[in-house]
Amino acid sequence: MVIDAWMQHGTVRFLQHEMLDSLWRWTGKKPPEKEVPVEETVAAMDAGGVDVGLISAWYGPEGALVSNDEVASFVEQAPPGRLLGIASVDLRKPMDAVRELRRCVRELGFRGLRVVPWLWELPPTDRRYYPLFAECVELGVPFCTQVGHTGPLRPSETGRPIPYIDQVALEFPELVIVGGHIGYPWTEEMIAVCRKHPNVYIDTSAYTVRRYPPELVRYMAEDGNHKVMFGTNYPMIAPEHALKGLDELGLPDDARERFLEGNARRVFHL
């Protein structure tokens, strides 16, 4: 089985947002003109051998680019078990955000919370995140976020693993944190934070196998084989393209299984 830890089934208002212009330019594609059917996302998963995709909502200062209820609808439209929801919330209203996270997990069956710091230009140490961290611990779900530079047209500072992820993990040692997008160009920092904190993980979304930094591949193959999970950032990278060259990494069988399935299954309670 293969589990994709970071996907989107995007709405037109999300996919056509000006902040994503740089990503479309890099991929050589254009954003869709009309809403994409869920069948297209499932077909891309099938082509890449992905069995389960965790699709997330997107909330920013301007509101919902992909709402939690839209994500729940996408999950419902897919074959059973193929798509699972990851919530997002509005940081401007912390108590409403906590209640919305609670609803998503308890009523909609979502498996975690994702907040993208660069979208808010607020690092994860900002006070507005802290009620959500406490609620994630109480609900038993991970906090998923972005680490590393910002590909979209927004500042990159909020993606530094040190000090931000390190500080959150110190103050909330029970909080499970998944840092998506590897952490490049601060990959060594992200690995150091993972080694330091037992509940901090990495997912490889936004990078193809052949672009993984050497230090990450070493970590995946050795002492970090229980800490790294596969992700694509679909639709920016299709699963088939993301996984091309996996055999060339030379991962031991147990490390490969944990990377593709086992770590995500454990972290997201699948």
Image: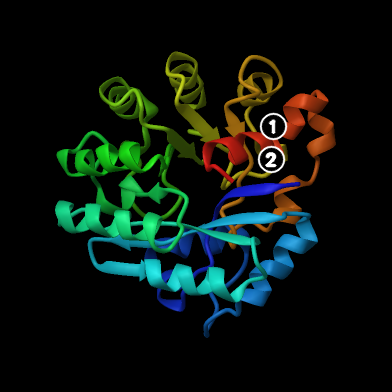
Foreground pick, 54 / 13: 54
Q: Are marks 1 and 2 in contact (CB under 8 Å)?
A: yes
Q: Where residue 269 appears, x then y in whole percent?
A: 54, 42
Asked if 2 appears above or below 173 in the picture, the reply is below
Q: Secondary structure at mark 1?
A: helix
Asked if 96 appears above or below 145 in the picture, the reply is below
Q: Secondary structure at mark 2?
A: helix
**Badge 1 density bin: few <14, some 14–19, many ≥20, Cα 10 Å:** many
- The dot on residue 258 is 1
**Badge 2 density bin: few <14, some 14–19, many ≥20, Cα 10 Å:** many
Foreground pick, 83 / 21: 83
Asked if 98 appears above or below 171 in the picture, the reply is below
Q: Where residue 260 appears, x then y in whole percent?
A: 70, 40
Residue 264 appears in the figure: yes
The residue located at (17%, 44%) in the rendering is: 128
Quarter location, residue 259: top right
Q: Where residue 115 appears, x then y in whole percent?
A: 35, 49
- The dot on residue 261 is 2
Under mark 1, the amino acid is Arg
The residue located at (41%, 46%) in the rendering is: 150
- Give left or right: position of 12 versus 214: left
Q: Where residue 227 appears, x then y in whole percent?
A: 57, 26
Under mark 2, the amino acid is Glu
Asked if 216 appears above or below 232 in the picture, the reply is above
- The dot on residue 250 is none
The residue located at (46%, 64%) in the rendering is: 21
